[in-house]
Amino acid sequence: MAEDVQTIPDLVFKKTAGFNKPDCLMIKKGGVYTNISASEVISAVEAVGSALLTWGVQKGDRIGLLAENRPEWAYADLGIQGAAAITIPIYGTLPSAQIEYIVKDSEMQYLFVSNEMQLKKILEICNNCPQIKKIVVFDPPSSLPANAISFQSFLEQGKEEFKKNPKAVRERAAQLQPDDVFSIIYTSGTTGEPKGVMLTHKNVISNVIAVCELFTFQPTDSTLSFLPLSHIFERMAGYYTMLYAGTTIAYAENVESVPKNLAEVRPTILISVPRVYEKFYQRVMDNVAAEHGIKKSLAMWALKVAAEYTEKKLSGKPVPSFKYKIADKLVLSKIRQRLGGRLRIMLSGGAALPRQLGLFFYGLGLTILEGYGLSETSPVICVNLPHKFKFGTVGPPIPGVEVKIAEDGEILTRGPNVMKGYYKKQKATDEAITPDKWFRTGDIGEIDQDGFLRITDRKKDLIVTSGGKNIAPQFVENALKTSRYVTQIVVLGDKRKFACALIVPNLDNVKKIAAAKAIPDSEILKSKAVLSEIQRDLEEHSKDLAPFERVKKIALLEKEFTIESGELTPSLKIKRNVVEKRYKEVIDSLYNEVVAE
């Protein structure tokens, strides 16, 4: 571990200060992106820390942060760290009932919230959480309750205090030790109640330094921050690592504006999840399908050349370089421009990246490097590298981290990135971490002869059919996600004769089937003709699946799975138990007819 950076405050007081960039952060104001300098960032961080100290915040106190990605998120988080307190990030999409659990369990006394909507959630639970002393609001409404203060007023208080005692925050931060907890992150919880993951300064700093040894992040680089900072993936990779490397962080306006912001910021580094890459792929394919005449023929030819180029290059065969150069000039380069045109590092995490998606982007001249980790591992365990990658794997372990496969196929890992434990849950901690410090990931996988890890599924998600066949649903889902008719898919079938799937369809494309067959909109989701056409398309995407892994029956759903409905975790993972319970009648109906296996 680098001697000069051992805690989170070291990142800002040493690294950020050392780079002294005029464009440390970027935020869109008045329709254009404007710079925030490193000195402005440090000034805001010290003001936040100073104000917290005047409120009597002690080392180890827990402070909540309920906000979307924005500069104030960083100011609050780093200021909390400067006061040697512990940041408790809360997903902005969580309802008040789930927030209440986190507030009570962590015993937090102070919160930073982004706006009136988030403030209302906290006010709803204040009667049940009397320990809440103060709430700081970034964008306050016209009137505030007695226990709330605007961020601007809070910052002014901190700046006045800083003038009186400019050394207070750094002196408090100097009390921190690498093994002190810097954050408690409440897991999404696909099953059961959330658990508070205690991460230490050493945990996350070791991850930052290891990743920076593997990738050439530079002060001339920039990234667009849009994944939730409440998730450790964006927080470590898109925030702390960027501060460590001196890379500019630009904040997206919101998730919906990401395509537009990519074109405006033109980042060189993109940190994303598969869902975003899937949407981009689908837009490209939909645009090609909507073309006519020579434009459509040219686009289809170029994509075919790109696929041929990918297949030959990755298998070590001579590549059609002349044809590829023409395809690139006429079509592929224009597709890259939609992502800003300057990307040189594209990382993917949070969920499995479908192999065919990686191959598609590689054909465009963009290599998505998939990694793997969990909140409990700060998060990175493995990652593919620019000079050493295999699609369909999550790469080899990062420096300092060990990985092995248990007898039952579970992935175990050990290293300086593994959490201290679950907050106030010693039994759960003992179940997760072995006496010799191996962390049980709950994922099933295998390591190939070159040391690359391949994830096959979650241990608890494995489907065992009534015929005794084991099916890894995520593996099957990844094979089917790139169907032009699929927006979301859940494969089910535990203790049943065969696998079935619940599909949230891409309605634009499904309606084209219906229009061609004169099927009214009201009948689309139940139409046998529509279902048969989608089933045929899924079979095309199932060529690499074993016969028993293939989906035999499907049902189309009217509504998307969402976080608000309780079907998705805040990190967009499917809560299979919730989906199975909610759609039990639909699932049961799929098994009423006899289907050949």
Image (cartoon, rainbow, N blue to C red):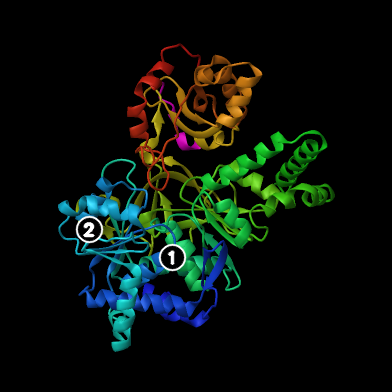
Q: CA distance from mark 2 to mark 1?
A: 25 Å
Q: Nearer the viewer, mark 2 or mark 1?
A: 2
Dot 1 amino acid type:
Asn
Is 381 in front, or is 275? Answer: 275
Residue position marked by numbered label 1 in the rendering:
207
Where residue 74 appears, as percent x and y from the top left, is 41, 67
Point out the residue furthest to the front here.
142
Q: Residue at x 61, y 72 (%)?
A: 220
Where residue 198 appears, as percent x and y from the top left, is 29, 60
Residue 468 lies within the magenta run: yes
Where residue 29 appears, as percent x and y from the top left, is 52, 64
Q: Which mark is residue 553?
A: none
Is residue 463 toward the left or the right of residue 153 in the image?
Answer: right
Q: Quadrant of residue 142?
A: bottom left
Earlier residue among tags 2 and 1: 2
Residue position marked by numbered label 2 in the rendering:
106
Q: How many labels were placed on the picture?
A: 2
- Tell me if mark 1 has few (under 14), some (14-19) or many (20+) residues whose alpha carbon lies within 10 angstroms of its own: many
Q: Are marks 2 and 1 in contact (CB under 8 Å)?
A: no
Image: 440 above or below 165: above
Q: Find the magenta span and give its range.
A: 467-475
Q: Decide if residue 240 is in sight here.
A: yes
Q: Residue at x 41, y 12 (%)?
A: 592
Dot 2 amino acid type:
Ser
